[in-house]
C-alpha cells in the first residue's frame, strides 16, 4: 500500500509568550520574561506551512488550544468570575498564570506518538496523546490534543486515538519528539524507534544529573503496546544522559530520521554502536538498509547543535528520491553548523537540499521546525477519511493570515497576562477559528 507523509504543524496560539517554564530547555530559560510577538510567531509558522505545501509536501495543521486554562486555575483554588480568577492568579502566582496561558501546544511533535497503519496489528493508524507530565504548563495539553485528533481522525475504521498514559513520573511521555520511524517507504511496514531518557524501575540505569529526562522506557513500551507494534520491528534506545544535561531535552534536538536515513549526532545515544546494530537488524526485517548520517563532535560540538537546532530539522523525501533538510535560520548563523551543512549537501549524501525558515519566535522558546510538526503517514483512503478543513492550501493560508492579523497582538509581556481583555480576545479568535477549520465544538 502506498502512503504519503503529512506534517501537521501547530498553529501558534494568540497567547504565545516567554515564561521560562521549561527547566532543561536552554532557550526557554534564556528568554524568560522577554516580550513576545504572537502575531509574528503565527505568521512565521504559517509561512513554513505554506511554502512546504506549495512544494508538494503533505501539509496540515493542528489548532491552538483554549487559553487561559481556567480549569487548571479553578482546580487549584482560584475562584470567582473569570476576571476574578485571573486577578487572583496574577497576584498570588504569576508563574502559574503563565502556565495556564502557555501556547506550548504549538509544538505538535509533543502532541502524540503516531504509528501508521502499516505497522499496527489491527491495520489502523494509531495515536497516543502524550501526557507531557514533566512540566505543569504542558501536563494538561493531552486532553485537548486527544479531542482535536479525534475530531480530525474520526473514522474508527481507519484511526484509533488513545488517551494519554497515566500522568505519573513512571510514564513520562513526550510523544513523537522521542520517536522516529525508519522504513523503506512510508506505505510499507517500518521500524519504530523509541528513544528514552531514563528507566523508572531500574535503579542501576544511568540518568541525567542536572536536567530532567522527560521520557521513560516504561512509557515508550506502553505506547508500543497500545499501538499493537510487533516486537521485531520496535527498537528502544537510551538517549545519552550527558547530552540531556547539555540541553537536549528531547531526542529530536539531536537526531532526525526519515525513510531509511538517520541524521544524528555522534553523542546522541548512550551506546551508539549498540543502537545502530539494533536498528540495522530490525530494518533488515523490513527490507531496508540503514543510511546512518553521523555528525561528529569535532565538526559540530553539542553546544552548537543545541544553539542552532541543526537536528531539530525536518527531513523530507522528495519526488526525485533525494531528501531536503528543513532547518531554522539559526543554522546559517552558527559557524560550525553552516560549514557542516555546506559540506553535507556537496558530499553526494541523501540530503541534497536545505530549506531554511525564520522561526525565531518559536525558537526563542526552544521550538524548531521539527518541534512544530507531527508526522502522520496516510494511505490514500486514510487521507480521504480525515477531516479536510485542516489541510493547508493557498486559500486556507490567506484566510488564516487575515484571521491572525485581525485577532493577534504584536507584543505580549508577562504583565499582559493579567489583562482580562486578553482572555476575551483569545476566546473570540478561537471561536472564529473553529468555524474556519470546520471543527465546531472544538473549544466547548
Ligand atoms: O516543551 N518549550 C517547549 C519546547 C518544545 C520543543 N519540542 C520538541 N523538541 N519537540 C518545551 O520545553 C517553553 C515555554 C515557556 O518557557 O514559556 C516550552 O514549553
Image (cartoon, rainbow, N blue to C red):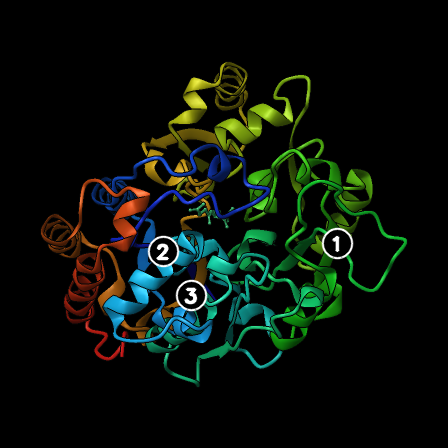
The numbered dot on residue 198 is: 1
The numbered dot on residue 378 is: 3
398, above or below 361, in the image: below
Q: Nearer the viewer, residue 122 or 45?
A: 45
Q: Nearer the viewer, residue 74 or 173?
A: 74
The residue lying at 53 percent from left, 24 percent from top is: 348
Q: Which residue extends farthest right?
A: 204
Element at badge 1? loop
The location of residue 364, given as percent across then percent down, is: 40, 36
The residue lying at 53 percent from left, 23 percent from top is: 344
Query: Viewer-nearest of labels 2 and 1?
Result: 2
The location of residue 430, given as percent across then percent down, is: 21, 65
Q: Are marks 1 and 3 in contact (CB under 8 Å)?
A: no
For disc 2, the marked residue is 91
The numbered dot on residue 299 is: none
Would you identify the image quadrant in which residue 211 lies?
A: top right
Query: Viewer-nearest of labels 1 and 3?
Result: 1
Element at badge 3? strand
253, above or below 416, in the image: above
Q: Closer to the N terminus: mark 3 or mark 2?
A: 2
335 sits to left or right of 320: right
Query: Viewer-nearest of labels 3 and 2?
Result: 2
Pointer 3: residues within 10 angstroms few (<14), some, or many (20+)?
many
In 3D space, how far apart are the residues under numbered discs 1 and 3 (Cα atoms)? 31 Å
Q: Is residue 360 visible?
A: yes
The residue lying at 69 percent from left, 36 percent from top is: 243
Q: Nearer the viewer, residue 363 or 57?
A: 363
In 3D space, how far apart are the residues under numbered discs 2 and 1 (Cα atoms)? 37 Å
76 sits to left or right of 420: right
The location of residue 440, given as percent across then percent down, is: 21, 78
Q: Is residue 63 visible?
A: no
Amino acid at each position: 500500500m502506498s502512503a504519503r507523509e503529512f506534517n501537521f504543524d501547530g498553529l501558534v496560539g494568540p497567547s504565545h509568550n516567554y515564561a521560562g517554564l521549561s527547566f532543561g530547555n536552554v532557550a526557554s530559560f534564556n528568554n524568560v520574561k522577554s516580550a513576545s510577538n504572537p502575531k509574528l510567531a503565527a505568521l512565521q509558522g504559517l509561512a513554513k506551512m505554506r511554502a512546504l505545501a506549495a512544494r508538494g509536501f503533505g501539509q496540515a495543521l493542528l489548532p491552538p488550544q483554549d487559553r487561559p486554562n481556567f480549569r487548571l486555575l479553578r482546580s487549584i483554588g482560584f475562584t470567582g468570575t473569570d476576571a476574578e480568577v485571573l486577578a487572583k492568579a496574577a497576584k498570588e502566582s504569576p508563574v502559574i498564570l503563565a502556565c495556564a496561558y502557555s501556547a506550548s501546544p504549538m509544538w505538535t511533535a509533543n502532541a502524540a506518538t503516531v504509528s501508521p497503519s502499516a505497522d499496527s496489528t489491527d491495520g489502523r493508524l494509531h495515536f497516543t496523546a502524550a501526557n507531557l507530565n514533566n512540566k505543569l504548563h504542558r501536563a494538561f495539553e493531552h486532553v485537548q490534543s486527544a479531542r482535536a485528533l479525534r475530531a480530525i481522525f474520526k473514522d474508527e475504521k481507519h484511526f484509533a486515538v488513545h488517551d494519554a498514559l497515566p500522568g505519573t513520573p513512571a510514564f513520562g511521555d513526550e510523544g513523537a519528539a522521542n520517536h522516529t520511524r525508519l522504513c523503506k517507504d512510508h506505505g510499507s511496514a517500518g521500524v519504530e524507534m523509541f528513544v528514552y531518557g531514563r528507566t523508572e524501575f531500574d535503579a542501576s540505569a544511568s540518568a541525567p544529573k542536572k536536567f530532567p529526562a522527560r521520557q521513560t522506557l516504561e512509557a515508550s513500551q506502553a505506547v508500543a503496546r497500545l499501538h499493537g507494534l510487533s516486537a521485531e520491528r520496535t527498537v528502544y534506545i537510551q538517549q545519552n544522559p550527558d547530552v540531556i544535561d547539555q540541553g537536549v531535552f528531547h531526542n529530536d534536538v539531536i537526531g532526525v530520521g526519515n525513510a531509511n536515513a538517520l541524521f544524528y549526532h555522534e553523542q546522541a545515544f548512550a551506546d551508539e554502536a549498540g543502537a545502530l546494530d539494533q536498528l540495522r537488524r530490525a530494518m533488515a526485517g523490513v527490507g531496508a538498509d540503514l543510511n546512518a548520517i553521523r555528525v561528529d563532535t569535532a565538526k559540530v560540538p553539542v553546544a552548537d547543535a543545541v544553539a542552532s537546532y541543526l537536528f531539530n530539522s525536518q527531513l523530507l523525501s522528495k519526488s526525485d528520491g533525494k531528501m531536503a533538510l528543513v532547518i531554522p535560520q539559526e543554522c546559517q548563523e552558527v559557524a560550525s553548523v553552516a560549514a557542516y551543512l555546506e559540506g553535507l549537501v556537496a558530499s553526494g549524501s541523501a540530503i541534497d537540499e536545505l530549506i531554511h525558515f525564520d522561526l525565531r519566535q518559536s525558537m526563542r522558546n526552544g521550538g524548531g521546525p521539527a518541534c512544530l510538526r507531527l508526522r502522520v503517514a496516510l494511505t490514500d483512503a486514510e487521507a480521504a477519511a480525515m477531516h479536510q478543513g485542516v489541510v493547508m492550501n493557498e486559500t486556507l493560508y490567506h484566510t488564516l493570515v487575515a484571521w491572525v492579523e485581525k485577532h493577534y497582538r504584536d507584543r505580549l509581556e508577562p504583565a499582559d497576562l493579567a489583562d482580562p481583555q486578553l482572555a476575551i480576545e483569545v476566546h473570540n479568535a478561537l471561536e472564529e477559528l473553529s468555524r474556519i477549520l470546520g471543527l465546531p465544538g472544538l473549544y466547548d
